[in-house]
Amino acid sequence: MQLVFATHNTHKLKEVQTMLPKQIRLLSLDAIGCHEEIPETGKTLEENAKIKALHVAKTYGYPCFADDTGLLVNALNGAPGVFSARYAGNHKDTDANIRKLLFELETKKDRSARFETVIALVLQGETHVFKGAVSGTIILEKKGTAGFGYDPVFVPKGYDRTFAELPLQVKNAISHRARATEKLVHFLSTLNLS
Ligand code: IMP
């Protein structure tokens, strides 16, 4: 079975590909000739995931899933949340996003946060939603070079290294996206796929 993951992010594609059963061939947006940036106009992670998955399923005719992820920081009342990608502006600059986050937290004692991922799957005309989260702490400065996004400043609970310092296998075992993907994989495994 061919399934599109509605992302241009090769890091995400690699993370998810390793978790899927072998009979599912994961296709990226580029692989199906979709080079557009699908607008994330929803007010919640769930709305954005659904918008992206439905757009691809309708326009390109493939079963498709899309994810949307946010970093929710408690001392910032859940910000950047659904605006995580554009926290420091529409240019989606990761370094600028991290700088802004560290600046906003400079005076805060509570540095607890969590990543949340929502996956929307559009299959045979129906939409299914899967969610995952991981709690942790925002550290004072960037550490590590692996991963992407806010990984260099996020230390998951129970660990003393950031997601950017931990091996990908560890991130893949405990991350927000891994937890949501596990639910997606479990659902797919209950279907009779060929
Ligand atoms: P999106 O879900 O790809 O739109 O991501 C929203 C924002 O969260 C972007 O700034 C990403 O870089 C960031 N992000 C998404 N997933 C992760 C992750 O696994 N680790 C760190 N940052 C992430």
Image (cartoon, helix red, strand yellow):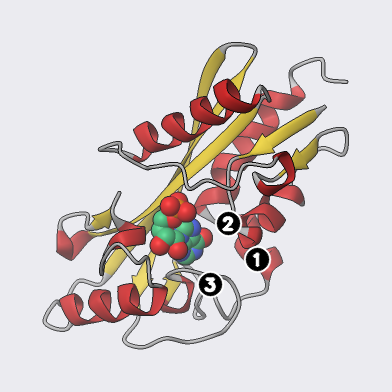
Q: Are marks 1 and 2 in contact (CB under 8 Å)?
A: yes
Rendered residue at 76%/25% (across/down): 189
Q: Residue 59 versus residue 181: which sits nearer the camera?
A: 59
Q: Which residue occupies the foreground of this view, 47 or 168?
A: 47
| Residue drawn at (30%, 49%) of the image | 82
Q: CA distance from mark 2 to mark 3?
A: 10 Å
Would residue 1 appear left or right of 134 to someone viewing this image? right
Looking at the picture, which amino acid does disc 1 mark?
Val
Q: Nearer the viewer, mark 3 or mark 1?
A: 3
In the rendered image, the quadrant that contains the N terminus is top right
Residue at the spot of label 1: 170
Of 122 and 183, nearer the camera is: 122
Q: Which of the 4 image quarters holds residue 147?
A: bottom right
Query: Regarding mark 3 in the picture, which secondary structure is present there?
Result: loop
Between disc 2 and disc 3, whose residue precedes? 3
Is label 2 or label 3 in front?
3
- Numbered circle sitting on residue 55: none
Say what amino acid the circle numbered 2 marks: Ile
Task: Give the mark nearest the N terminus, 3 or 1.
Answer: 3
- For mark 2, give the secondary structure: helix
* Badge 2 density bin: few <14, some 14–19, many ≥20, Cα 10 Å: some
Q: Mark 3 is on which residue type? A: Phe
- Residue 66: give x, y in percent of width and height: 54, 38
Q: Residue at x 32, y 72 (%)?
A: 97
Q: Residue 180, percent across and down?
A: 55, 41
Q: Quadrant of residue 29?
A: top right
Query: In the rendered image, is residue 134 in sight?
Result: no
Q: The C terminus lies in which quarter of the figure? A: top right
Secondary structure beneath label 1: helix
The residue tagged 2 is: 174
> Which residue bears the numbered disc 3?
163
